[in-house]
Structures are given as structure tokens and as C-alpha cells.
Amino acid sequence: MDTLFKDWCKENLLQVEEVERFVYLIDGKSFLLLEHKNGRIVSSKFSLILNKEEEDRLEFVDFVTFLWGEKFYYTSKDKIKSPELTLLRYLGKVSENSYPYLGVHGKYELLNGTKDYSEWCNKAKFLQVSSLGICEKNTLAGIFQFQEECKKKEIKSILGETITIKDEFGIFQAKCFVVNSTGWRNLLLINTEINVINPSRYVTEERLLELSEGLIFIFHPVQSPYDLRKIKQYSQKFLKCYFQLDSCEYNSNETDKDFLYETNKYLKNSHIKPILLNDSYYLEKGDFHIKSTLNTIEGESDLL
């Protein structure tokens, strides 16, 4: 159990100090690690099971922590008989990372993004991320809740959207981020084009360029293969233009090849700069299956 606990703390970047056997210090609070008794940690009444040694140590700690399934949870010591299952994550802080993270796809991106914005902000605060950006696809539904949660954690919120655009060649996706009040008004109008005016959920390129003031535009190498003419056109209209540089790896070798090839073409060009941006649809690598499940549901719902 002790080894499993230490591995969990290491994987989740928790700064842990062992003060005595099965007692650990995390973020200035003491945690007593409970052992399973005959494979059990709770009674039939869902009360935590403690042995005599653990009961004796209880008055000297703040919390107890325990393995439940494959994850560690904790609860305050006065909740032994009715424990709260709080995941043992995002306690304390890691080293300084004062940089913006722009790729949040939360719960309002239905059947694709995940998690409440409070959880995104908890992790951002833990990692000491200074600014957090939202870019959910074709929706601004979560913007205000996202702002409120960022404000609670004293994190600067950056507002944006992944939008679907129709040009003379077809449909592609890109990102717009707000710089000022004019940009916010224009993003609202772009969102209206996508969700109200055009039934197929897109904004025309012509209309997008009319609403470019106060916005930053970000090309994606897969969605927008390198096109100097388009880059110059958009750069003249938008406040700034960048291309997305991320560590994405695609399941398709062909798509992965195209992504690397187009990224290389962008990198070699001096007309547009890269911006580090990873699209994140879940918080922890162990949650990767959630997105696949949601996407499967979306596919099935399209058939109904």
C-alpha cells in the first residue's frame, strides 16, 4: 500500500514528506494512510475500517487517505463514519509555471469535452498556470461559468472559441480568441452565424473577415494546410494571426504525416509565428477513455 501511495503521489506531482510510518505531510497538512483489512477499507455501512494503531494515530493527523478502486481519496478525520470521497490531487503547488494555457474543452462542448470548469481551475492553480483559455467548438455556452471559476482561483481567463469556417474550397476549423470588448462582440456575432443563421453550423469566410476586429486568429496545420495567400489575407484583417504548435499525435499515420509536414511548412515561414496550444478534452491521462465514449454516443445519436 505504501508503495502504491508513493507512486500515486509521484504521478500526480504531489510534494509529499513522510514524517513517520503511514503518516505523510502534503501542503502543510498531515495524512494518515489507511490499510485495507482483508481486502476491505469500508464496512457494510460505508464507514472507514481502522485498526487499533490507526485509531491511536487519528488525533494527531488532519486527514485520512485510502485506496478506493485504483485511485487514492481522502477525507477529514471527523468523517470516518461517513467519509467524503475527495480525490487526492491538486494539493499544494508545483514549481513555477507562469504561462498561459489556452486549450480547455470543458463540459459545455457536448459529447466531446469533459469536466466542470472548477476542476480545470483547480489543476491550473496547482500547476501555477497564470492564464487559462477556453476554446470549445462552436459554442460559447460555458464562457461565463468559466470566467467565474477562474476568478475564484485568481487566474486570468482568456475567452475564445473553435469555429467552423466555410470558404470556397470547403469546411475547416480554426480558433478565435478575444482581445478586447470589440472582439467579444464580434465573437458573439460569429457564434450567432454558426448556431442561428446557418443550419449547417458554420460562418462563411467573408462574414468572418468582416467580424475580425479585436480578435486573434489561430490556424491549425491539419485543418488549414499552409497557404501564404490566406495567411496574408487573414493577417491584414485580424489583430494578430498565429498557427497552432502542439504535441498532438494522431491515430492515423497518414494524418500524423500530414500534420508534421504542414507544421514544418509553417515553421519555415516568417510570415506567421507559432503559438503553443494543446487542445485538452480531459484532465488526466487515465480519463482518455471518456472522450472516446462521448464521441461514440455522439455518432450513435446522429443515426437516430
Image (cartoon, rainbow, N blue to C red):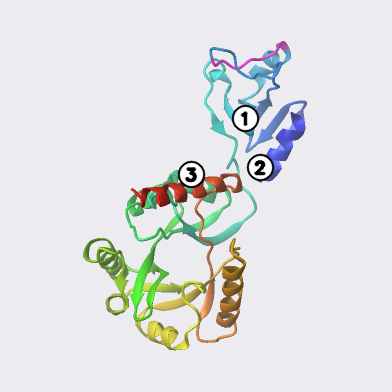
Q: For mark 3, what is the residue?
A: 119
Q: Residue at point 41% right, 83% down? A: 235
Near mark 2 (Cα within 10 A), the count class, few <14, some 14-19 or many ≥20, is: many
Q: For mark 1, what is the residue?
A: 69
- In this view, the residue farthest toward the front is 303
* Number of marks: 3
Q: Position of residue 267 (x, y in %)?
A: 58, 80
Near mark 1 (Cα within 10 A), the count class, few <14, some 14-19 or many ≥20, is: few
In-image side of 128 versus 179 (left or right): right
Q: Residue at point 37% right, 66% down? A: 163
Q: Reply above or below: 135 against 288.
A: below
In-image side of 132 versus 73 (left or right): left
- Disc 3 versus disc 1: nearer the observer: 1
Q: Is residue 151 visible?
A: no
- Disc 1 versus disc 2: nearer the observer: 1
Q: For mark 2, what is the residue?
A: 14
Nearer the N terminus, badge 1 or badge 2?
Answer: 2
Q: Position of residue 58 (x, y in %)?
A: 65, 18
Q: Residue at point 22% right, 65% down? A: 197
Provide the residue span drawn in magenta. Answer: 46-52
Q: Quadrant of the N terminus?
A: top right
Q: Residue at point 29% right, 68% down? A: 190
The question of residue 246 being in magenta is answered with no
The amino acid marked with disc number 2 is Leu
